[in-house]
Image (cartoon, rainbow, N blue to C red):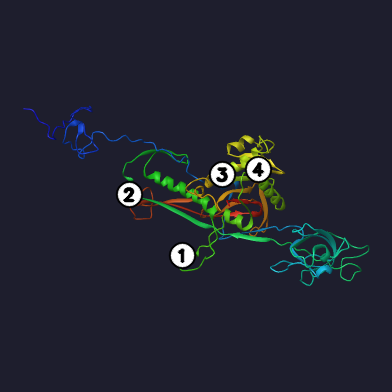
Amino acid sequence: MSLLPQFGAIVPSQTQSVLATNYLQWNNNGGGGGIPGNFADFAQQYLPEIYESEVERYGNRTLSGFLRMVGAEMPMTSDQVIWSEQNRLHISYANVAGTGGGAGTGLLIPVAAGIVNVISINDTIVILDPATGTEAKGIVTASGAAAGTGALTVQLYSGLTIGATFGANAPGLKIFVYGSDYSKGTTIGAGAGNSAARVSVEPVLTQFSNSPIIIRDQYVVSGSDTAQIGWVNVATEDGTDGYLWYLKAASETRLRFEDYLEMAMVEGELNQNAGAGANQNLLQPGTQGLFAAIQARGNVETGFTAAQGLTEFDAILKNLDTQGAIEENMLFLNRQTALDFDDMLASISSGVSGGVAFGLFENSEDMALNLGFSGFRRGSYDFYKTDWKYLNDASTRGAINGVNSIEGVLVPAGTSTVYDQVLGTNIRRPFLHVRYRASQTDDRRMKSWLTGSVGGGTGSTLDAMEINFLSERCLITQGANNFVLFRGI
């Protein structure tokens, strides 16, 4: 007596053989092998083909690396970083007005808002009218510096009056001191012949500060889910490779958090409403990031294009001449602005990288190229240009184009000298650097720890594994007057 199949016309095979009688059509409830009545939902002989390797359709998705390339990281112990930057050395004033009409020989310096007149009698000055280009030189015969006013009496070397030279009560003049002129046998002191007491010029430092923010993230997986097997062969942006399941998500959480560490330093803003309201989030003071610092204390170039690139770029150089005139600078640009620079350089030279001393890269052009930089020289400045992925990525600023979009940044290379309020001395620091909270007991540069009952965590009855990430840091932008932010029209 033979045993008939118990499942209709499906006949199990004792070996892994492809037969018409043991075929299960898994995508519907019948029709397998041309035989009706197959129970596809009961069992499946063949599962769909699964590629075990992920397809990296977005390439390297991380955005960090900008600050590691241009700055440094240093520990701090306080809730605030305070530093002072030197002001200009020479004496000059803007928005000076003539007084006394056409016959006037007086000038009035605006001494409001903390401006102090420090020009002394017998100082020689240059007077400029930016609107007309008119220029004159003269000697100061009376000054209201001692009386706390901005009034000056000036005798022009041309023999004309200020009113006749610049117009009656001319506004918007600029003046600066270029020396002094004393008679023979005089001393500097009130009542001593032709001399008068000089004003002692005290240096004034401009003070800046920034506060760190606490950045946190967490990944949680339940204890039961960690027991499941769902391995996928992955290659992550941090260089790891292998079979992962739940740690794949943890790995991406860490990569995303590391990007946040840099993005927060670039995009950070001070909270003008700190302390307003009962919401604890509103109590945080925020932090001043790179973009905010440049817009507040630096230079903003709007609408840089290839059509007028060289003219516009030369105007940037002229402005840098009036600032710190840092010889080596780095340009981090989005795709369109980088192409505009390429078109600008192609119009003036076929070998744009020739003649550049790659001092920033140990004088090695190969090192600069390996880091993605290409160099060119214009005037007395060396520039190293590279793409900034953060400005091209569609998930960040790469999706923002046009009006008021950020298209690039010029960052000076090297270090600057500032007065450290804590150390009480002048110190040299990179123009751009990160300060993070650290002490002998806790380093908050980049912390990660496990809690819960799974994965080695302790101190909790939670049946899950919690991976925590934390950092406390702020960005210091020194000498922001040497930075340039490129914005769209």
Res 128 → quadrant: bottom right
Q: Position of residue 174 (x, y in %)?
A: 76, 61
Q: Is residue 239 above or below residue 260?
A: above
Give whichever of discs 2 and 3 has the lower sequence position: 2
Q: Which residue is mark 2?
A: 223
Kindly identify the residue that appears in the image at 58 percent across and 41 percent down. Answer: 339
- Label 1 or label 2, whichever comes before in sequence order: 2
Q: Secondary structure at mark 1?
A: helix
Asked if 57 appears above or below 124 in the picture, the reply is above
For marks 4 and 2, the one nearer the N-term is: 2
Residue 98 horizontal/vertical position (percent)? 78, 67
Q: Nearer the viewer, mark 4 or mark 1?
A: 4
Q: Which mark is residue 383?
A: 4
Comparing labels 4 and 3, the label whose residue is closer to the camera? 3
Within 10 Å of disc 4 (Cα), the crowding (few <14, some 14-19, many 20+) is: many
Frontmost residue, 368 versus 39? 39
Q: In what element is the residue under mark 3? A: helix
Q: How many marks?
A: 4
Q: Which mark is residue 280?
A: 1
Q: Are marks 1 and 2 in contact (CB under 8 Å)?
A: no
- Element at badge 2? helix
Q: Mark 4 vs mark 1: which is more N-terminal?
A: 1
Q: Residue at x 52, y 51 (%)?
A: 263
Which residue is rendered at x = 46% and y = 68% of the image? 278
Q: Is residue 222 left or right of residue 264?
A: left
Q: Earlier in the sequence, mark 3 or mark 1?
A: 1
Q: Amino acid at mark 4?
A: Phe
Residue linked to disc 3: 336
Label 4 SS? strand
